[in-house]
Amino acid sequence: MQIHIQLIPISGTNELTPGPDPPENIYHYTTGLKLKQIINSGHIRPSTAHVPPHEKPVAWFSTQEQWEPTATKVPAPGMQGQIETAKAQGGLVRITVPGLCAPYVFPQLPLIAGTKPSVCIGLLIAGLELGSDPDSWRFSTTSVPTALFREVEFFDFAHDSWVAVDMTELACRN
């Protein structure tokens, strides 16, 4: 396996520039339990878990339409991990938002969020071991409000497909 690391040039100014043009849609992968928290708060918020005080928390997204392996919450690989995560966490969820909601790509993490390069390499290796494609990773340092959600879907294992849910109904249940 070859790993290619692309360095993002740093300009002479302190300007933070977005990454390459985003696709029309990107996806935030989460679970049913986390979806309730997202709906109740009104935002996908940057995660503060394991983020040192000197770094900016980020919210992660993917350009891939299939489940993002790094979103699996149990230590089991592949489909087994997805099934166990779904059982333990109230299902697998995919939230579609405009691509502009996450303007940065993974190689920009040290510059934008202040993440140490050694931590970035660890994230890269962990993602590759789980079967993820780091080229699909995008992030934001700001919250993404539910008003920008284009679609919320649960994964239907029986039909191997994503099924849209009505956000109004979902909000009433929470």
Image (cartoon, helix red, strand yellow):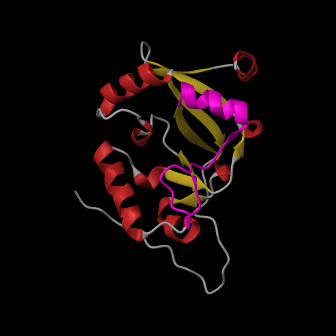
Residue 139 found in image quarter? bottom right
Is 120 in front, or is 68? 120
- The residue located at (60%, 34%) in the rendering is 95
Figure quadrant of the C terminus = top right
Point out the residue furthest to the top here.
158
Expressed as whole percent of the image width and height from the top left, the position of residue 150 reads: 69, 34
Q: How many marks?
A: 0
Q: Residue at x 41, y 69 (%)?
A: 117
Q: Residue furthest bottom?
A: 12
128 on left or right of 65: left
**Residue 7, horizontal then vertical, whole percent:** 44, 73
Residue at screen point 51% across, 20% down: 90
Q: Which residues are magenta?
A: 31-58
111 horizontally vs 142: left or right: left
Q: Is 20 part of what is drawn in magenta?
A: no
Residue 5 position in % (x across, y down):
37, 67
Q: In this orientation, which residue lies closer to the viewer: 29 or 76?
A: 76
Which image quarter is the N terminus in?
bottom left
Asked if residue 88 is positioned above or below residue 146 in the image, the reply reads above
Residue 48: percent from the left, percent from the top? 56, 51
Quick check: is 51 in the magenta stretch? yes
Residue 153 relative to residue 43: left or right: left
Q: Is residue 74 above or below residue 50?
A: above
Viewer-side residue, 153 vs 171: 171
Above-or-below relation of 156 to 37: above
Q: Residue at x 42, y 17 (%)?
A: 157
Where on the picture, by quarter, is residue 85? Answer: top left
